[in-house]
């Protein structure tokens, strides 16, 4: 990475502490990713993006700001990227996945709180994240109690707006969600100084749809019996989607998808035959949190699909604009896509999530499901019990894990994951009995 100290200084960052963070990332990345065998060549781009995560991309965002554009930060996939793009903004995911930021977060938040929230707030408190230092507005949401209250703390340090989201599906929930979208549009128009118009919104929808489509295309290749890409590499590519330039991401991810499709045709796999295929479901896995994927994939199994907000929930459904001829109708279509199809545990009831997991188990020929939740995430922890019952009734093995970003529990996690994988041998895998392989 080039020397960006001048740029970081201009963002009022704590340079000495940030240097410590920059020194820790490359060896961690090398140990997790570069030790894998036979990675797709298309991953070179994503390696570069991570190497430049606090450099080149920030420079691009600052150039955008210099041209009058705005940067909008978000923590949740209910915040619609289409609207930000249509108003000439760039949206970046601010969810923080590093243990490095947790102690700073604990200076202003209770310790018994989800690490994603503590790390996010800690990144701002410590002034060591150039994304937090660059944003013109942070859009939070009142999905869970921890986040809802954390925005009050963050609001004292950065311009913060909170989307008021419902906690039930159905008509009244949708009306509230639709109103929150309208309120958000007003706020974003005020911040960007632009008005939403039909053509720009239509074009932004089309851009984000292409991003979703390429992620879906990549995931499709993981359904093959010869798995062309590791779960770790797919996780990295998905994480990059949250802050990379949309068009460049689409180009690079398309090349990677083509390479993976060719690998599938050639029967080229990154795992030996018979490797157990796992689905990971639960809370989001944000950069640089690669802990559990790494443990799974060095314990004799492969992650072939993630049902979470950095996985299928992010890209699976489409915005249906057919018949829309006004801005309001386009916003309706966006609202339906987000509200109807994202099944977050912050909603009650939330049966759609277990339905999705069961469908994905079949589509990806999965041997077992890992419920991976961040510590102190009450909504997902409570939902685990229902998930277990639903999966049990379908004969699908389930392992529930709770962890944070620290390395202290890696040994214990490995022991439990290895035992789970060991148990996934016939005849304990009823869903695969008598089933033809996909390819
Ligand atoms: S749509 S999952 S991105 S809220 S912060 S709920 S882990 S205690 S992130 Fe989320 Fe939107 Fe839902 Fe997805 Fe739990 Fe932590 Fe809360 Fe979290």
Image (tube, rainbow, N blue to C red):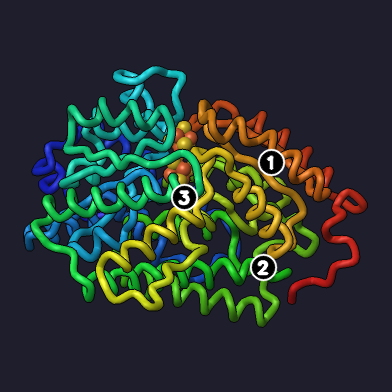
Indicate which disc, 3 or 1, sits on the residue closer to the N terminus: 3
Residue drawn 59% across the image and 28% down it: 409
Residue 387 numbered tag: 1
Residue 171 numbered tag: 3
Judge whether 322 appears above or below 327 on screen.
Answer: below
Residue drawn 53% across the image and 28% down it: 378
Position of 202 compared to 25: left or right? left
Residue 106 numbered tag: none
Question: Would residue 235 be seen by someone viewing this image from the given angle?
Answer: no
Tell me which image quadrant ligand 1 sits in.
top left
Q: Quadrant of the C terminus?
A: bottom right
Q: Nearer the viewer, residue 122 or 22?
A: 122
Q: Nearer the viewer, residue 354 or 252?
A: 354
Q: Are marks 2 and 3 in contact (CB under 8 Å)?
A: no
Residue 156 coordinates in the image, percent (x, y): 18, 27
Q: Which residue lies under the disc numbered 2?
A: 223
Judge whether 262 appears above or below 411 on screen.
Answer: below
The answer to whether the residue bearing label 3 lies less than 8 angstroms from the nearest atom of ligand 1 is no
Residue 42 coordinates in the image, percent (x, y): 46, 71
SS category of the residue bearing label 3: helix
Judge whether 438 appears above or below 11 on screen.
Answer: below
What distance separates the C-alpha of mark 3 from that of mark 1? 25 Å
């Amino acid at each position: 990475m080039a020397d960006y100290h001048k740029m970081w200084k201009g963002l009022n960052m704590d340079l000495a502490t940030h240097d410590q963070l920059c020194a820790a990332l490359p060896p961690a990345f090398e140990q997790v990713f570069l030790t894998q065998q036979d990675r797709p060549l298309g991953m070179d781009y994503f390696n570069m993006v991570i190497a430049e995560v606090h450099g080149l991309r920030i420079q691009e965002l600052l150039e955008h700001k210099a041209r009058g554009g705005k940067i909008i930060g978000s923590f949740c996939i209910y915040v619609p990227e289409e609207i930000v793009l249509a108003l000439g903004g760039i949206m970046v995911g601010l969810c923080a996945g590093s243990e490095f930021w947790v102690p700073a977060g604990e200076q202003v938040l209770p310790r018994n709180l989800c690490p994603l929230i503590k790390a996010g707030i800690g990144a701002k408190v410590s002034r060591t994240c150039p994304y937090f230092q660059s944003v013109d507005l942070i859009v939070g949401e009142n999905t869970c109690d921890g986040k809802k209250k954390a925005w009050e703390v963050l609001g004292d340090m950065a311009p913060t707006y909170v989307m008021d989201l419902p906690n039930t599906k159905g008509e009244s929930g949708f009306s509230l969600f639709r109103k929150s979208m309208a309120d958000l549009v007003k706020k974003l128009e005020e911040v960007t100084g632009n008005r939403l118009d039909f053509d720009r919104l239509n074009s932004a929808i089309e851009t984000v749809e292409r991003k979703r489509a390429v992620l879906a295309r990549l995931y499709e290749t993981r359904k093959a019996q010869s798995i062309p890409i590791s779960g770790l590499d797919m996780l990295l590519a998905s994480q990059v989607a949250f802050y990379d330039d949309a068009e460049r991401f689409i180009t690079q991810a398309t090349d990677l998808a083509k390479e993976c499709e060719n690998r599938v045709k050639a029967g080229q796999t990154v795992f030996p035959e018979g490797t157990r295929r796992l689905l990971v479901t639960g809370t989001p896995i944000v950069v640089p949190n690669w802990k559990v994927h790494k443990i799974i994939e060095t314990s004799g199994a492969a992650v072939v699909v993630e049902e979470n907000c950095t996985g299928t929930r992010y890209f699976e459904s489409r915005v249906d604009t057919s018949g829309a001829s006004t801005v309001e109708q386009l916003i309706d279509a966006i609202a339906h896509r987000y509200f109807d199809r994202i099944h977050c545990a912050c909603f009650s009831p939330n049966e759609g999530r277990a339905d999705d997991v069961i469908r994905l188990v079949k589509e990806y020929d999965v041997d077992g499901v890992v419920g991976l939740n961040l510590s102190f995430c009450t909504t997902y922890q409570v939902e685990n019990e229902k998930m277990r019952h639903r999966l049990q009734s379908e004969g699908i093995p389930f392992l529930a894990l709770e962890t944070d970003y620290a390395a202290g529990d890696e040994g214990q996690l490995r022991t439990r994951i290895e035992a789970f994988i060991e148990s996934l041998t016939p005849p304990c895998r009823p869903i695969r009995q008598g089933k033809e392989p996909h390819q």
